[in-house]
Amino acid sequence: MHANSTQNRSETSAVRSKSIYQYMKSPQFLKYYYKFKTVSMLDKEEIEGSSPPDLFVGRYGYPHVYIGPLVPPQLGDTTVLGTPEMWADKSIEEIVKYRSLLVRGIYETNVNNVDKGKVEEIMTELAIADKYTYAEVELKKKPDMGLRFDDNSQPFGPSAPLKNLKIEDVSPNRDVEKAYFDTDLHAKDAIVELYNKKVIVSKIQKALSAGVLGTHGKRKFVPTRWSITAVDDTISKANLEKVMTYNTIDATTIYESIALDTRWIVLMMPGEWSYELIEAWYPNTTWNRDNPNIQIYSSHEFSKGRKTYAEIGGCYYAARLAVSEHLNRIGKIASVVILRETHPGYIMPVGVWNVREHVRETLKTQPIKFDSIYDALRYVDNKMDISISTWIRNSTILRHHMLQKRLIV
């Protein structure tokens, strides 16, 4: 077994691209792809349907990027197709089915051109829309029938250059609309304000991506993958400001769950705030295609937070958001270590929503309390396939707590 806690996933884009390409050529990919792609529905240049609503902003070529709506060839309530908060109990097959139906019309613009053209203005309307919205998309050619995967954003389906776009019957979300018209409200403040008003996280992410939030003259399109992490990071930091004022939990506690062939354990220990996410990827999983050994990655922070982007990527901030919500809900502070053991059934990247929503779901389960950290670690050793010694060896926070215990004794 090979354990590597320092490898930076954000520095291996070439390897990631190769892995995704190899995956798309694999029998597993073809099984899902050809099962769910509906060629007869999408093999045309005009698409009429109800956007969930959803949109996408690319990052390649920044500040010149491709923007566009995501529209399925279906009318009616398509909310589930674009709402990750509804996917926690879904299978990979179902998620691929949802996303493969969404056609992306792509239109090139400058990120500063918010509200400076017809397509740009429609992107704003889609971001503000409160519910599924009727759309007519005219493409310059029939969409390609591929599926695209990203480690941060959810998959998206066929795409083609956009020729014309029209939407009707837009019902705005009043809270997002208010933030849009408030041009003195900074984007970070708008994100937190919308969250506190119970606007779902994915909706806030789309609003930021479409340039709906921010002060006058500073609004711009934000690539989707950047907006996702920015919102997760901003909200969790705001939550943690409150968490820092609470008393500590009174016992070492474990929450656990299994989803998408991934085992989750959230370990909470009494003490001041610290946080770590450790991911173990078995061979033939998304981030371990070619290596025959298990690969382990981790990132952490202590009470002062991080000054650099997490080595582990956007998953770190997505999980931290879920943890900060939970601690606010119970009114306690804790030192938190999340263990993610991903097995070969997790065959494709579906986005960091998977981490946020499944950690949220894990923290809704009945907790198990332990008399000591050592009792908790013995429990983990029985629950996970990977030995507890390996988890400890790859964990800064666990080693820190165990050292503290020895010093106290």
Image (spheres, rainbow, N blue to C red):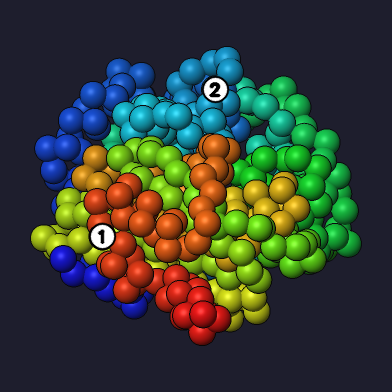
Q: Which residue is mark 2?
A: 78
Count the marks: how many?
2
Q: Kindly report the distance in space between the C-alpha atoms of the residues bearing marks 1 and 2.
A: 43 Å
Q: Nearer the viewer, residue 343 or 201?
A: 343
Q: Which residue is mark 1?
A: 387
Density class for disc 2 (Cα within 10 Å; few <14, some 14-19, many ≥20) is many
Q: How far across and how far down the image is residue 407, in percent?
A: 51, 84
Q: Image point 17% across, 37% down: which residue?
A: 28
Q: Nearer the viewer, residue 387 or 61?
A: 387
Dividing the picture into quarters, in which one does residue 250 lie?
A: bottom right
Tell me the mark number nearer the camera, choosing from 1 and 2.
Answer: 1
Q: Image point 31% across, 62% down: which residue?
A: 388
Q: How far across and how far down the image is residue 246, in percent?
A: 77, 62
Q: How far across and how far down the image is residue 311, in percent?
A: 42, 72
The amino acid type found where label 2 is placed reads Thr
Instruction: Tell me the element at label 2.
Output: loop
Q: Image point 61% across, 64% down: which residue?
A: 270
Q: Image point 77% across, 34% down: which residue?
A: 173
